[in-house]
């Protein structure tokens, strides 16, 4: 068996959580491979909304295993809160969830360092979710980090204290930044007890053994390809590889074990936090997209910047990920727009560029193709036969230009508002 990978092709929040939940019945195992509580994955079913941060989006399905891989960073405090909320809904988390011994821990001081760094950057800030992601991955690559497996070893407290000492030395270099190292420390140690009760595994061995047994695995990405540490709009990115290669390093799967790669994109584009976004709309249309699409961050509540879809950016993401099929979400949000625009290239000075450039900036003027919009409400439809012809034209155009089939169209946030295009999936 191979591992299929599902990931976002834009700047995150493409609807990954919803689609993973829809696809979970087809898989035995769902595994997160990177990121941490900077993610907010929303699932809606039976009239209830759930937002997951660290826990894979297959957790609600009976009989399915969920794994947090070595590439993920865990904040025990947030993790405990997530588990408590799920258990309150009678979701038996400990029966369904396993954690890699090699996943790194986010310390309270990582969060403080994140805030200090953003504070020091002022206007040039990344717009981090302030969950301590950057500093934790810095300690990982700097070979100073603490891992889940360390909690069980002698000298853990000493290692923790030594790392905090190092963080204090770093924090002292920031001017005009006040902090309290002790603020969340007691809660952090208390929360470790919840983590310790869960099955802690060598997830790379476990996953490869499952593959040998013929089990099917879906790797769930967090963030989006344009936030990838290598391929995103650097430095306005997150600190992990959000692209398909991240599934290999974040789970311990060899590249020849990767099967299908599902690329999720919104029918328009959004971004939360700073950084270039050439198709961003500052007018009424942008406001409408935000309002109709409820574009407010699932983790931070911040308003998301909204704009039209960007073809050069999507093509780039499809290439670096090896996307085999596309899933388009939020098609319903575009109902009521008289025209739907698609950025096909950027004008930069007297040059026309149709590839994502090294120095993507907001000074690039998008070249748009306009397609006719549709006014029909899509949220109640249940098959492709009911698609308005203009939506079908939009889908056909995107498939042609992106040279990849769109196999799922999402027409609302609920699990049931999902149209599988059987003609593609067959
Ligand atoms: P993720 O981070 O990729 O899992 O996405 P988020 O959960 O952060 O953001 C996606 C938002 O869009 C959530 O509020 C979802 O409930 C919602 N959503 C997902 N798919 C659709 C859809 O097809 N239509 C509408 N209207 N909302 C959707
Ligand atoms: P999901 O999984 C959207 C953005 C932040 C910021 C940048 C760096 O829900 O799609 P970080 O906290 O990682 O240091 O922030 O990345 N960002 C996200 N934007 N969705 C996410 O996750 C994000 N995770 C991080 O807004 O611009
Ligand atoms: Mg999200």
Image (spheres, rainbow, N blue to C red):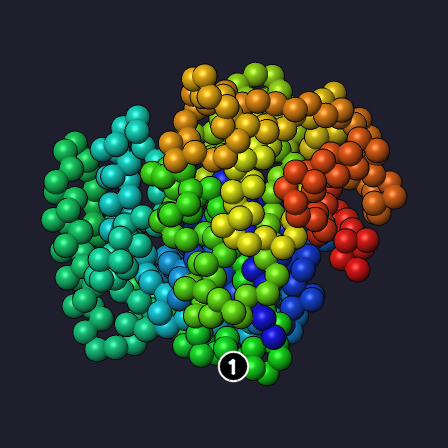
Residue 426 position within the rendered picture, expressed as x and y whole percent measured from the top left: 79, 60
Visible residue check, residue 190:
no
Residue 114 position within the rendered picture, expressed as x and y whole percent measured from the top left: 28, 43
**Residue at (41, 60) in percent of width and height:** 72
**Residue at (28, 59) in percent of width and height:** 140
* Few, some or many residues within 10 Å of mark 1 (<14, 14–19, 20+): few
Q: Is residue 383 left or right of residue 149?
A: right
Note whether 189 is above or below 341 in the view shown: below
Closer to the camera in the image, 201 or 363? 363
Q: Is residue 23 left or right of residue 35?
A: right
Note whether 226 is above or below 6 in the view shown: above
Element on which disc 1 rests: helix
Note whether 88 is above or below 362 in the view shown: below
Q: Is residue 32 left or right of residue 121?
A: right
User: Badge 1 is on which residue?
Assistant: 209
**Residue at (28, 36) in percent of width and height:** 118
Where on the picture, by quarter, is residue 24? bottom right
């Amino acid at each position: 068996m191979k591992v299929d990978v599902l990931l976002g092709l834009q700047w995150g929040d493409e609807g990954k959580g919803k689609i993973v939940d829809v696809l979970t019945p087809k898989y035995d195992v769902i595994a997160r491979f990177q990121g941490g509580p900077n993610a907010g994955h929303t699932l809606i079913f039976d009239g209830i909304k759930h937002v997951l941060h660290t826990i894979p989006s297959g957790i609600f399905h009976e009989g399915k295993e969920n794994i947090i891989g070595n590439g993920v960073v865990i904040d025990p405090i947030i993790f405990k809160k997530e588990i408590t909320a799920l258990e309150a809904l009678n979701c038996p988390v400990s029966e369904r969830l396993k954690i890699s011994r090699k996943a790194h821990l986010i310390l309270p001081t990582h969060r403080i360092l994140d805030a200090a760094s953003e504070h020091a950057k002022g206007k040039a800030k990344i717009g981090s979710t302030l969950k301590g992601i950057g500093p934790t991955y810095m300690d990982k690559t700097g070979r100073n980090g603490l891992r889940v497996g360390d909690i069980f070893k002698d000298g853990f407290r000493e290692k923790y204290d030594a790392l905090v000492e190092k963080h204090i030395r770093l924090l002292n270099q920031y001017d005009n930044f006040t902090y309290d190292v002790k603020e969340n420390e007691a809660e952090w140690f208390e929360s470790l007890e919840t983590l310790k009760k869960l099955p802690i595994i060598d997830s790379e061995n476990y996953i490869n053994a499952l593959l040998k047994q013929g089990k099917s695995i879906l790797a769930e990405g967090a963030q989006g390809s344009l936030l990838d540490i290598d391929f995103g709009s650097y430095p306005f990115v997150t600190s992990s590889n959000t692209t398909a290669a991240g599934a290999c390093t974040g789970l311990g799967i060899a590249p020849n074990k990767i099967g299908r790669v599902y690329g999720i994109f919104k029918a328009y584009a959004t971004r939360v936090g700073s950084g270039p976004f050439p198709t961003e709309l500052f007018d009424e249309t942008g406001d409408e997209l935000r309002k109709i699409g409820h574009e407010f961050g699932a983790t931070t509540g911040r308003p998301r910047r909204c704009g039209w879809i960007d073809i050069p950016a999507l093509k780039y993401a499809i290439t670096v990920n090896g996307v085999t099929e596309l899933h388009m979400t939020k098609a319903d949000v575009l109902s009521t727009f008289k025209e739907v625009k698609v950025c096909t290239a950027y004008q930069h000075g007297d040059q026309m560029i149709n590839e994502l450039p090294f120095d993507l900036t907001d000074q690039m003027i998008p070249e748009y193709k306009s397609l006719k919009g549709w006014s029909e409400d899509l949220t109640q439809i249940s098959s492709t036969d009911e698609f308005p012809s203009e939506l079908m034209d939009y889908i056909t155009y995107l498939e042609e230009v992106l040279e990849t089939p769109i196999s799922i169209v999402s027409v609302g946030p609920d699990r049931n508002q999902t149209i599988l295009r059987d003609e593609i999936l067959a």
